Image (cartoon, rainbow, N blue to C red):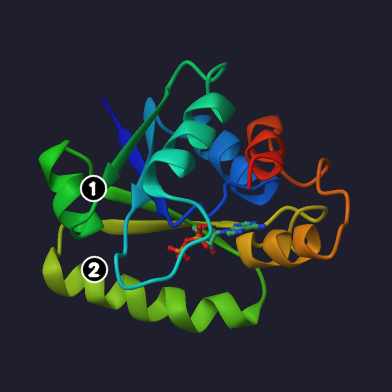
Amino acid sequence: MRIGIYPGSFDPITNGHMDILKRAAALFDKVILLLAVNPSKKSTFSVEERLKMMKEAVKDMPNVEVDFTSGFTVNYAKKVGSSHIIRGLRAVTDFEYEFQLAAANKFVDSDVDMVFLMAGQTTSFISSSMINELHKNGADISSLVPPSVVEAYSHL
Ligand code: ADP
């Protein structure tokens, strides 16, 4: 079985992430949407809240599972028998970081390969931090995030 891992902070998950996820789910037998927890990074939502939103967002996607790790994604990938890590690319600004990350992952495990999917035209401007900013300023974010995220913001 060909397994792809889609890791990220998902703070919160957005329709940009969902676009990449749907396309990845068509390429792999199974995709694990992986909350890669970085304890040193300040987050808007807790790990539990983020996982809840992610699980709700993928509930109708039969070949997608949600999990989390506080370790290296490459180590997680090896553990579950995957050698493909999926990432989304938006503007040029994503490229430099992703390029470095790909090299670091190869350094840790040379068997692992990164799969990059180009952001969709209508979702390429969406980022989790942009959603946070829009919400703080009273904008309606319901067309930019899954319903579970709109719900979570209403409890913040
Ligand atoms: P990280 O902190 O690991 O970058 P994010 O949750 O911000 O986690 O992003 C996870 C992945 O999804 C990254 O590869 C990022 O480039 C990609 N991504 C984020 N937003 C979008 C979007 N709107 N369209 C396509 N890819 C995206």
Residue at 30%, 31% in the rendered image: 2
Residue type pointed to by label 1: Ser
Give the camera-side residue of 142 and 106.
142
Identify the mark nearer the N-term, 2 or 1: 1
Of badges 2 and 1, the one in the foreground is 2
> In the displayed structure, would residue 21 be above or below residue 89?
above
Q: Secondary structure at mark 1?
A: loop
Q: Position of residue 9 (x, y in %)?
A: 44, 57
Q: Residues within 10 Å of mark 2 (few under 14, many from 20)?
A: some
Q: Is residue 132 left or right of residue 33?
A: right
Give the distance between the C-alpha atoms of the residues marked 2 and 1, in whole angstroms. 11 Å
Q: Residues within 10 Å of mark 1 (few under 14, many from 20)?
A: many
Give the camera-side residue of 11 and 80.
11
Residue at 18%, 58% in the rendered image: 71
Q: Secondary structure at mark 2?
A: helix
Residue at 13%, 46% in the rendered image: 78
Instruction: Write down the residue under mark 2.
Output: 105
Quadrant assignment for ligand 1 = bottom right
Q: Position of residue 130 (x, y in %)?
A: 71, 66
Instruction: Write down the residue under mark 1.
Output: 83
